[in-house]
Image (spheres, grey):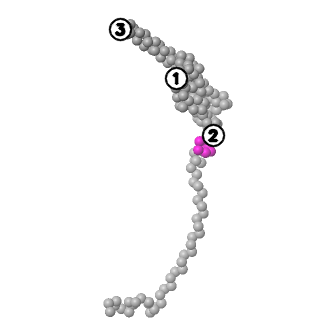
Amino acid sequence: MSNPEQLLASFDAKIAEAKQRGDRMQAEMAAVSVSERSQDGQIAVKVNHLGNLVGLEIGHAVREKANLADEILRTVQRAQSRLAGAVQAGMPSIAGTETMNELVDQLHREFPKPEPEGFVDGGPAAPANDGARFIAEEEPPSPPKPKPAPPRPAPEAGTDDDYFSDGDYLR
């Protein structure tokens, strides 16, 4: 059996080593970021290791563009989808480990590749005009109104068919 003091010293050394590895991993992870540009180059974004937007540049040519917000979001999604590769390249301290594999898998699940441009889930793109979004469907033509029934002829005097027309019903 070994000396309890040696056991505690060994345990303290392992804890200090694990803390150093954790600090190194944290510093490597914090240094990971991904930058991406839109297809026309007018929008540039930067996302950090968590996928949060930390930088945004918008060119003057697109500031009045109708779908500017959509273009920015698409560019951010493309940058986020590249995070897994950036983490693999930027964190050599845990390369090839089970921790790295799990982290990369989680990033792939969290930030999948964006849909191809022009693809809209559920159908064609929504109209640009909000008022045009709620167009009432054309109602089918109503069927012609039926002709009113001819009025009943007035009963002739003295020709009442009623059984009790002669008087009292308690005869």
In the picture, measured across the screen, residue 53 lies left or right of residue 62, that is: left
User: Is 113 a magenta residue?
Assistant: no
Query: Compared to 145, does 5 lie above or below?
Result: above
* Amino acid at pointer 1: Glu
Relative depth, front residue between 89 and 76: 89
Q: Closer to the camera: disc 1 or disc 3? A: 3
The residue sitting at the front extreme is 1
Main SS, magenta region, reads: loop
Tell me, for residue 98, which label it has, or none.
1
Looking at the image, do the residues carrying marks 1 and 2 touch, with CB atoms under 8 Å apart? no
Query: Compared to 123, does 117 lie above or below?
Result: above
Q: Residue at x 57, y 28 (%)?
A: 80
* Amino acid at pointer 2: Phe
Tell me, for residue 119, which label it has, or none.
2
Q: Residue at x 43, y 10 (%)?
A: 13
**The quadrant where residue 11 appears:** top left
Q: Which residues are magenta?
A: 118-126
Q: Position of residue 105 (x, y in %)?
A: 54, 28
Looking at the image, do the residues carrying marks 3 and 2 touch, with CB atoms under 8 Å apart? no
Tell me, for residue 117, which label it has, or none.
none
The C terminus: image quadrant: bottom left
Which residue does the numbered mark 3 point to in the structure image?
Answer: 4
**The quadrant where residue 4 appears:** top left
Query: Compared to 63, does 13 lie above or below?
Result: above
Element carrying mark 2: loop
Crowdedness of circle 2 by 10 Å Cα count: few (<14), some, many (20+)?
few
Relative depth, front residue between 100 and 118: 100
Instruction: Choose the circle earlier in sequence order: 1 or 3.
Output: 3
Q: Residue at x 37, y 8 (%)?
A: 1
